[in-house]
Amino acid sequence: MKVIIVGAGKVGTQLVESLLNEKHEVTVIDNSQQVINNLNDNFDVLAVKGNGVSSSLLQEVECAQADLLIAVTDSDEANIVSCISAKKMGTKCVIARVRNPEYVKELGFMRKTLGINYIINPELSTAHHIVRLLFNEHVSYTEDFAKGRVRITEIQVSPNSNLLYKQIKDLDLPKSIIITAITRGGEVIIPNGLTTIDPLDTLYVMGERNSVDTFAQAAGSKINRNRVKNVFITGGGRTALYLAQELEHLGVNVKIVEQDLERCRLLSEALNSTLVLHGDGTDISLLKAEKVEEMDAFVALTGYDEENMLVALLAKQLGAGKVIAKISRSSYTSLLETIGIDNAVIPKLITARDILRIMRGGKIITLSLLIGGRAEVLEVLPQPDAPILNKPLRELGIPQGLIIGAILRDGRVIIPKGDAVIKSTDRVIVFTLENHMDKVTKLFGVRGGHKGIL
């Protein structure tokens, strides 16, 4: 597939990595020479310096022959214009990133009238993701697939865990679960029966929902069955606004601390019952004064990774319930696990996930990016002519970094062995490292779902 990306910031660069792993032909436009040089040094792409709004530049990169154009610059207006121009020139499908809250009510109009196929809003998607984390009983990362019957859960191995120093083959694992991956010291390990569980390992366990929960609890994973009623947010940007609006709708009491006085006024006008405080969210005396220890959840949403990590850690030490920090650097995820922060949200991964789901089409129902984007979990519907159908899995030459984790068949969850056979009516949950995604699409015969994407 020929893909043009306009804007190579955090999201654009993440998309470049993901699309190259799937063997797409990628062209990138950015107006910064430093960004262009970095792309040329690190990726096998055509990187062009210029303004993605320019029709002559779009013609130069053969926009008319492109299957997809994704506009993710810092300007909503530039993204919209780039997509309109590309569509007029013949690009089959266009996706625009639009972030301004004032445009949210106009998204339907933009799609219908301006011909933009898809519009994504990273801050809104991030807010939705945080809400799911807040109302998830597991304190650590958990995601459900196959209509809620299959679950993957992150289990952080504590120093006194009964799993320590045991080989996986010696663990008392239920038949309906599988350990798909282990992260250790920032490295991703695809385990086998001889792999030993070490202190501070993080396990990614997949299987039948109840069995995963039972195993996770036995392994020391924290469960919080109390409904979230009080949430404290530090940082009053767009994500905080969207999050507070959604929490208000759910009947949750919300406090926001923001340093910029004018932003506080805007938040107060846009929100109904949320208490907006003007102050420094990293000020420990303010956190104590606002009784952060009584909060069911604390969410750090400032524009600085280090500040979010620091204040989230402070809130945790003061006694806040579930603690979530927004970060932009995927490399920080392993650090967060070791210092006790419950969840990290990485907006660029959430946005990339939404775009990849659009590209891969309706046969990939659910998609989750794990371990800082280095792995994915997908729920896939095999195509009628897919190579994976009606053959024992052991005969397919599946690489080590690709795991058929679970099969949903007739409402029953199956953890497949080597002799298992996938049928055309199955839903299949796949765990894969980032460099094996092209093999997933080939095995399952998956092509893009939008009518214009091949």
Image (cartoon, rainbow, N blue to C red):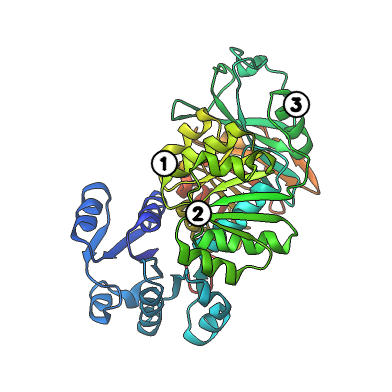
Percent x, y for residue 149?
Answer: 76, 45
- Residue at figure coordinates x 69%, y 38% from the top left: 138
Question: Which of the 4 image quadrants contains residue 221?
Answer: top right
Secondary element at image label 3: loop
User: Is residue 132 rendered to the left or right of residue 397?
Assistant: right
Disc assigned to residue 306? 1
* Disc 2 crowd, CA 10 A, few/some/many (<14, 14-19, 20+): many
Q: Find disc 3 in the rendering and name its residue.
A: 174
For discs 2 and 3, the disc positioned in front in the rendered view:
2
Residue that sits furthest to the right in the current view: 411
The alpha-carbon separation of the residues under discs 3 and 1 comes to 40 Å
Instruction: Tell me which amino acid carries mark 1.
Output: Glu
- Residue at figure coordinates x 52%, y 63% from the top left: 264
Are the residues at dot 3 and dot 1 in contact (C-beta closer than 8 Å)? no
For discs 2 and 1, the disc positioned in front in the rendered view:
2
Q: Is residue 440 visible?
A: yes
Disc assigned to residue 235? 2
Percent x, y for residue 161?
Answer: 65, 17
Instruction: Mark 2 or mark 3: name the one nearer the start of the chain.
Output: 3
* Disc 1 crowd, CA 10 A, few/some/many (<14, 14-19, 20+): some
Residue nearest the observer in this picture, 451 or 239? 239
For discs 3 and 1, the disc positioned in front in the rendered view:
1
* Disc 3 crowd, CA 10 A, few/some/many (<14, 14-19, 20+): few
Percent x, y for residue 25?
Answer: 34, 60
Instruction: Tell me which amino acid carries mark 2.
Output: Gly
Instruction: Mark 2 or mark 1: name the one nearer the start of the chain.
Output: 2
Secondary element at image label 1: helix
Percent x, y for residue 259?
Answer: 46, 56
Q: Is residue 447 visible?
A: no
The alpha-carbon separation of the residues under discs 2 and 3 comes to 43 Å
Q: Is residue 41 above or below residue 118?
A: above
